[in-house]
Amino acid sequence: MKKSSYPGYEAIRRKGWLAAHKWLLLRRLSQLSIMALFLVGPLLGVWIITGNLNSSLTLETLPLTDPYLILQSLAAGHIPQGTAIIGGLIVALFYFVVGGRAFCSWVCPVNLLTDLAFRLREKLGLRSATSLPRYTRYLMLLATMVIAFVSGGIAWELVNPVSMFHRGIIFGTGLAWLILLAIFLFDLFVSRRGWCGHLCPVGAFYSLLGTHSLLRVRADARARCDDCMDCYLVCPEQQVLRPALKGADTSPVINSPNCTNCGRCIDVCALDVFQFGIRFDRSDSSRSSPNQAASPSTGV
Ligand code: SF4
Ligand code: SF4
């Protein structure tokens, strides 16, 4: 039963504000710290990391490269340098283990913007003008690869909002802010979680990368669920929750590669149904849950 008009109210009441925002605060810290590490070089001359989210060198030693960029480069017919390939393998291995879309919620700066648009549209009570299929992002991903192949260049990077965010802050380029403003307005007025949840090819790529990731959110205590719906209301990928939370004979592990491991469902659940864990199943006492027959109508 719903206990308040905003999701997380009951969690705050029971656990305290800090505990009910733990993962949200940690990932904001992560996103802002990563951005700061990139910015202290060009802005203050303190070069801990050189480069950007596409390709960087930490402490003049550790190369990190976006594996999606490497794939586009290969599709365009260019063989990246050895250091870039090593950097790409390191990043790919990391997200292969922790979940590809952890990039979205823990690293990508655009997520700050789209989360803000989501909060605002919820506050204003706006409804979606259109509902795009979520697979559209995979078509976008395919399109970027085909364009790279046909054009012989990485055209997507000219308009990639993830890179644009970085460029916008450092160089203040107008096009960057225009693209980001368009995404913000699209998410605010046109489609709920429109960009990150339906269109972004970067998120689509990282979801594929994390298909078999080890780190997962688990609903081991799903027997406690009282259908308050708070997790559904805050989750950026609502469709991933139901099988783990309400599947009578399915695993309590959220196995969808589109779960962003943001931990918001853990934060807002007053009954501590969710936790981070690994994908392999433990014995699941929750299958005898009296609540499992009642599935919330999520509209997703
Ligand atoms: S979906 Fe795209 S823009 Fe959104 S957080 Fe992920 S990579 Fe960033
Ligand atoms: S299921 Fe939880 S961790 Fe995964 S995206 Fe939704 S709110 Fe975030």
Image: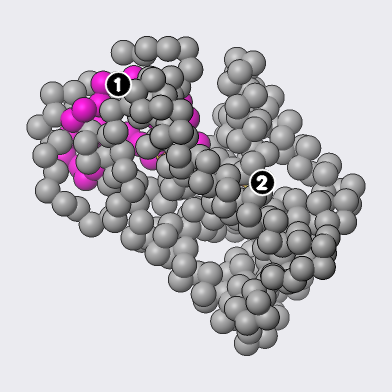
Residue 67 visible in this rendered orientation of the protein: yes
Q: In the image, 191: left or right of 288? A: right
Q: Is residue 30 above or below residue 179?
A: below
Disc 2 residue lies near ligand 1 with CB under 8 A: yes
**Secondary structure of residue under mark 1:** loop
Q: Nearer the viewer, residue 186 or 43?
A: 43
Residue 208 visible in this rendered orientation of the protein: no
Disc 1 residue lies near ligand 2 with CB under 8 A: no
Distance Cα–Cα, label 2 vs label 1:
31 Å
Q: Residue flagged by tag 2: what amino acid is it?
A: Val
The residue at which mark 1 appears reads as 227
Residue at image location 16% in from the left, 51% down from the top: 282
Q: Are marks 2 and 1 in contact (CB under 8 Å)?
A: no
Q: Which mark is residue 253?
A: none
Q: Quadrant of residue 246?
A: top left
227 within the magenta span: yes
Q: Which mark is residue 110?
A: 2
Query: How far across and down, in percent of the image, does residue 289 sit?
Result: 14, 29
Q: Quadrant of residue 73?
A: bottom right
Q: Residues within 10 Å of mark 1 (few under 14, many from 20)?
A: some
Q: Which residues are magenta?
A: 223-252
Q: Quadrant of the N terminus?
A: top left
Which badge, 2 or 1, is on the more N-terminal residue? 2
Q: Residue flagged by tag 1: what amino acid is it?
A: Asp
Residue at image location 53% in from the left, 69% down from the top: 91
Residue at image location 65% in from the left, 32% down from the top: 116
